[in-house]
Every structure is written in C-alpha cells, then in structure tokens.
Amino acid sequence: MDEQPTFPAGAAWFPEVVRHFERPLTRYALSLTGDVERARDAVQETFLELVRSASKVDRARPAPWLFTVCRSRAIDLARKEKFMKATDVADLAERPSAAPAPEAAAAARESAEEARRLLAKLPPKEQEVVRLRFQEGLRYKEIAAATGLTVSHVGVLIHNAMERLRGDLDGADASPIRS
C-alpha cells in the first residue's frame, strides 16, 4: 500500500475505495477486536461514515481517514461488548495460499507462526503500529493520524517493537533444537 492507487473521480470513486480498502480495513479491525463479525461491522460502519463525510476525505489519499475511523469503530464495538482478545494464531495459520512446495510451505508457516507468537508478546500499542506499518503499509504520518499518536511516538514504538522482536528471534535461534 506504499504506492497510492489513483481513484476515479465522480460516482466511481466510492466503489473503488471500498474495493481497495475493504480487506486491509477488515484485517486491521480484526487485530483490534479479535472477532471477524465485529471487524466486519466496524468496516461497514467506516464505509457508511465515508458516505456521510465524503466531502471531508482527501480523495487522493483516503487511507489515513479510513484507518482512523475504522480504529474508532472497532474500539467502540469492542467496548460495547466489554471484550477484547488477540487474534487466534491457529485461525491465521490455516489461511489458504498459492501452494509452494510442501517443505517451503511448512517452513513459511513455522516462520509466520513464530512471528505472530512474538508479535502477540508485544504491548498492544506496539502490536498496533507494527501491524499498520508492515501489514497495511501505512507511513508513520498515516499511522499517527489513525491512532492519535505523534509521528515521533509512532517511530519510537516501532523501533522498540523491532528491537524486542530481534532480541526474541536471536534468543529463539540460540535455543537448542528439540526432537
């Protein structure tokens, strides 16, 4: 998402924005709510708000506005149910892929599972900014706009998270292999 798509002018703008952002927003909302249905509800409410507030949105770069509203809706939904949990690693590991060789697929799954396990150990704010940066491809400024943090705070959180992850990975590489 580093390269910003060009959205058509006029009536075709909204369907293109929905097509482009529905999945990334759902992934993001899922990381905040831990529930697919609540995540979908948050995204639906985000797009409804987009219809109501279209004149306030930068049509060339709608991502910061969309992620900000989606974050707010997801947190509101999680608060309403007074229930927030992390995304289940087992559910994420079962996603279908474009089948590479079985050995490569197994190694990739193990690496991805390890990354998710290590990511889940980070504090929630660090998890959120890391996901927005590396999963959704947002820039620091866009992450700051979406989360209400300063750009420098986003940078510090990402730096600290990456240092923790590197340390955890180094520790995991040094651990003996179990048979």
Image (cartoon, rainbow, N blue to C red):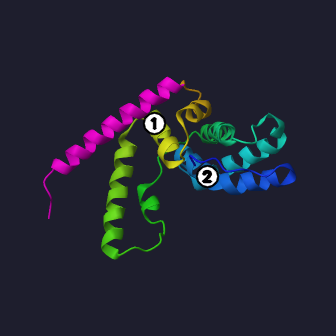
- The image's mark for residue 101 is none
The residue stretch that appears in magenta: 151-179
Quadrant in which the C terminus appears = bottom left
Magenta stretch holds residue 96: no
Q: Quadrant of residue 70?
A: top right
- The residue under the point 52% across, 42% down is 132
Vertically, is 85 above or below 153? Answer: below
Vertically, is 22 above or below 68? Answer: below
Label count reads 2
Q: Amino acid at mark 1?
A: Pro
- The image's mark for residue 26 is 2
Q: Amino acid at mark 2?
A: Thr
Q: Is residue 176 left or right of residue 12?
A: left
Q: Whole-percent x and y of residue 55?
A: 83, 37
Q: Nearer the viewer, residue 128 or 81?
A: 128
Magenta stretch holds residue 163: yes
Q: Is residue 94 left or right of residue 51?
A: left
Asked which secondary structure carries label 2, the reply is helix
Q: Earlier in the sequence, mark 1 or mark 2?
A: 2
Q: Which residue is mark 1?
A: 124
Q: Quadrant of residue 101?
A: bottom left
* Mark pair 1, 2: CA separation: 18 Å
The 10 Å Cα crowd at callout 1, few under 14, some 14 to 19, many 20 or more, is some
Q: Whole-percent x and y of residue 59?
A: 76, 42
- The residue under the point 49% across, 37% down is 129
Asked which secondary structure carries label 1, the reply is helix
Q: Looking at this rendering, what residue extends furthest in the right direction?
A: 11
